[in-house]
Image (tube, grey):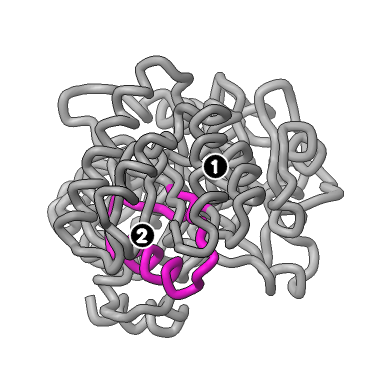
Amino acid sequence: MHLVTFSVMGSSEAARTEIKNALFGSAYCRLLTECSDGRQLLLDVARVRPSAAVVVLDALGQDEQLELIKEMATVSPETAIIAASIDASPTMILGSIRAGAHEFLQLPIEKSEFQTVLERVSARRRISETDQKKEGRVIAVFSGKGGTGVSFLATNLAAAMNEPTLLVDLNLQSGDDASFLGLEPRYSIADFVTNRARLDDALMTSLITSHSTNLALLAAPSEAHETEEIEPEHVTEILHLVSQRYARVVLDLPHTFDPITIAALDIADEILLVMALDIPGIRSTKRALNVLDRLGYPRGRIHIVVNRWTKNTDVEVSKVQAHLGQKFFGLVPNDYGKVMDSINLGRPHVQTEPGSRIALEIKRIAGSLFTEGPNSTAAQPRKKSLRNFFSRQSSPTSLELAANMSKS
């Protein structure tokens, strides 16, 4: 089943909460927007282009809600419309279908019925994709341990792409990608969040900092307090939006399994897990793989990249690969002097030293991603729900995530 994105509208907060819980309970669903007003739903659907929109019908506003369904079916025919209501009478079901709804969901939600609706919406999305522009591919660069060179690799990987690429700095407290690229952004992801209700192509373009013809940056906030309003669902919505406008989106992630990091990993088509080939690096990579496994991410989406690799290491590559249960996707050579020169210059190494061993390996990694084949796992969602994994109805805190990681 394909990943399905949702916008939800209902005047009843209880009904919206029930629907959200059902969505959060499925690994194949992502909630992009939620509102209580029909006009806002139309704006949300036009802005984020979800796979499906749920309209909760109630007795008091039923006529207006059916009119909303009619209007949405006209202005956004690619979006599957799901009418939801406590009243599942033939009159209600037939009325919603005649208005333009593609599915009807009775409240309270019955799990098997919800799964059936989800499967039909997913199938409809898969068919419609053949006639629509394919979304951009998202690459997350992550490490279970700090100091492995994730930001260096993310910025250079983004610069090595031969297609329009957006680098997103999700190190919200201490992002350095702007300095790695020699940029001084006026805006950041915090401005995306503040203005998310009115984002359009023109506004998004103004909030993103251009680096070169094929590379742009969505910067981390410059002040720590600006991160306070950024929630995981905001990250999901923003990454969904930018992936519709760029062929490649590269995510520079912090080295903690917090809710925002997991929201980003959920969107990613491919995950580059960066490690150092030493004992602490091997241990942290093993722990990170265990957490990713328990979260249900397919191993085919996870690619281990060794950074600062040297042939003189005492660690045998074959033994480490056997210990981790996975072959290495890349071995980026160690050249501390050249790397520091590029960082201090504020220019990607793949541009300043395009023929160096480091640059050639990063370009090889960039070219090896998204190779399609019978076993391709790109764009497949993870197999488990985050809420099921932590067995709670609220988002886990960073400490709770760290505790789960330490048990792996």
> Are the residues flagged by discs 2 and 1 in contact, CB closer than 8 Å?
no
Q: Secondary structure at mark 1?
A: helix
Which amino acid type is marked by label 1? Glu
Q: Is residue 20 magenta?
A: yes
Above/below status of 224 relative to 233: below
Residue 248 at what x, y percent from top left? 52, 31
- In the figure, is residue 142 to the left or right of 284? right
Say which residue appears at 26% left-offset and 64% top-offset.
Answer: 109
Foreground pick, 255 / 54: 54
Foreground pick, 147 / 260: 260
Foreground pick, 354 / 225: 225
Q: Quadrant of residue 205?
A: top right
Q: Which numbered marker is on residue 85?
A: 2
Q: Secondary structure at mark 2?
A: strand
The C terminus appears in which quarter of the rendering? bottom left
- Work out how far the residue at label 2 is from the one at label 1, CA to CA, in angstroms: 16 Å
Is residue 166 visible in the rendered image? The answer is yes
Q: Give the residue at mark 1.
A: 67
Magenta stretch bounds:
6-32
Q: Quadrant of residue 303?
A: top left
Is residue 254 visible in the rendered image? The answer is no
